[in-house]
Structures are given as C-alpha cells and as structure tokens.
Image: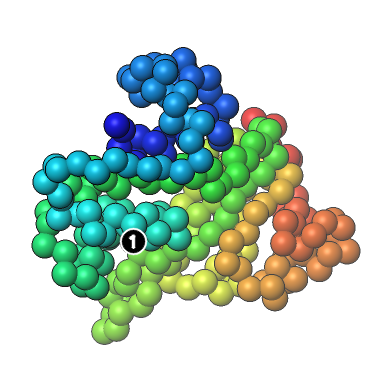
C-alpha cells in the first residue's frame, strides 16, 4: 500500500510529464509493477490500517486546497492553521507534508534577451533622507542599467523633477560613452516622457523612446 502523496506523484509523472512506468519507478525508487498498478487507478483508495494517526491528518485536505489556491510556504500554512484551526502539531511534520504535496507550477516569468547596445532600463529609488542645513531632504537615486552587459550607472539627487531626470540621463549617456537604441522606463509620469520626446522626432512609442534630444553615438558594445 502506498501513501496518497506517492500516488499523486505517480499520477503527475505519468499523466502530465509522460514518463514510462520504468522511469517513474527509478525516479521514486519503487517497483515498476507498483507504479503501473497505481498509475492506472483513477482514484486513490487506501486500505484501512491500525497505524497511529498523525495530528496533521485532519488538516491535510484543507492544506492541499490552500496550496492549489496559492503557493504558501510551510511557515505561512503553520501560522494559518494555528490561527484558524485548533492545530497542535509541530511545524516539522507540516513542512515534510507540504514538500510532498505542493503542486508543480510553471515558472511565472519571461526571460528577455537583448543585443549589445539595444536597450537600457531606468528607474528611481529612495535612499532615505539627509540633513540640508536645518532641515532634512529626501535623497533619491537614479539608476540606468544596460540590459546586455548589466553595466550600471547610479546618481544621487535631492529631487525627481524633470530637470533632475533629464540631467541624470545626460550624465548616464556620457558615462556609458553612447546612447542605447531603446530605454525602458519604469514608474515615470507620462508628461515627463512627452517633454523628453514629443513623438515627432523618433516616431517610436513614448513608453519605449529613443532619447532624440541627446546627440551621441549609439552604444555598440
């Protein structure tokens, strides 16, 4: 008799990953005939036994439901069980169970690739504040990163107004020794982009705009 967790793994490997019974057996370290038997079953039917029940047993179904809704960590589930249910077990047995039954999810990201000189990314950040005379001012920093080489330019400023934004771009281009073909801008108001390039100079989308107001050679490396 196998556990429900092992049954779920057999079904996953057989139906979703298309592994053979022999491959599944080697992966899970069980007999090939046992794999074939449980892979053909549509539902899990455990036989009754006299083993001592775990404190986690009453909560296994709700844990599985939570994991299907969101990729909670074992610690988050432990805290939620303690808050919403009278769970008195430990976190170690819960961690082992979550590791076995957690649904396999496809990576939720897109890998981007750029050629040398094709693109740079720009964003603002906050580094806290600093004393200026008798007052304190917000300390911001401008970041531009070349997407291919990951070469980074950082400039600290006391403001994020248009003049700071444009000057930081100018300084970054001088630092890099050229201008990339595109600049991806995060969290920048539309009116600043309109000021930099009204759209008639380069004809590109304003959200991914070539900075036509700067005369530099394009970056080739």
Where does label 1 land, which residue?
A: 62
**What residue is drawn where x is 14% and y is 42%?**
51
**What residue is drawn where x is 84% and y is 64%?**
199
Quarter of the figure with the C terminus: top right
Rendered position, 66 above or below 176: below
Determine whether the residue tagged by mark 1 lies in a helix, strand or loop. helix
Residue 219 placement (x, y as % from top left) = 68, 37
Q: Residue furthest front?
A: 48
Displayed quadrant of residue 49: top left
* Of the pair 108 and 113, the residue shown nearer to us: 108
* Of the pair 71 and 49, the residue shown nearer to us: 49
Rendered position, 16 above or below 36: below
Residue 44 placement (x, y as % from top left) = 40, 42
Displayed quadrant of residue 186: bottom right
Displayed quadrant of residue 9: top left
Rendered position, 137 above or below 2: below
* Of the pair 86 and 202, the residue shown nearer to us: 86
**What residue is drawn where x is 56% and y is 46%?**
109
* Of the pair 205 and 106, the residue shown nearer to us: 106
On the question of residue 86 being in view, the answer is yes
């Amino acid at each position: 008799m196998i556990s429900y967790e092992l049954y779920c793994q057999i079904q996953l490997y057989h139906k979703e990953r298309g592994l053979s019974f022999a491959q599944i057996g080697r992966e899970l370290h069980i007999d090939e005939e046992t794999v074939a038997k449980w892979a053909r079953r549509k539902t899990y039917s455990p036989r009754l036994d006299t083993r001592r029940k775990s404190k986690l047993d009453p909560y296994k179904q709700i844990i599985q439901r939570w994991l299907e809704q969101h990729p909670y960590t074992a610690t988050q589930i432990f805290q939620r069980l303690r808050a919403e249910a009278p769970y008195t077990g430990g976190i170690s047995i819960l961690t082992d169970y979550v590791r076995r039954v957690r649904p396999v999810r496809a990576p939720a990201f897109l890998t981007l690739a750029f050629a040398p000189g094709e693109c740079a990314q720009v964003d603002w950040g906050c580094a806290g504040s600093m004393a200026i005379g008798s007052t304190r001012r917000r300390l911001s920093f401008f970041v531009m990163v070349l997407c291919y080489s990951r070469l980074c330019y950082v400039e600290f400023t006391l403001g994020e107004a248009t003049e700071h934004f444009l000057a930081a771009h100018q300084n970054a281009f001088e630092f890099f020794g050229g201008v990339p073909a595109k600049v991806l801008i995060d969290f920048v108001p539309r009116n600043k982009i309109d000021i930099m390039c009204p759209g008639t100079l380069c004809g590109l989308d304003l959200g991914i705009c070539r900075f036509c107001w700067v005369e530099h050679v394009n970056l080739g490396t």
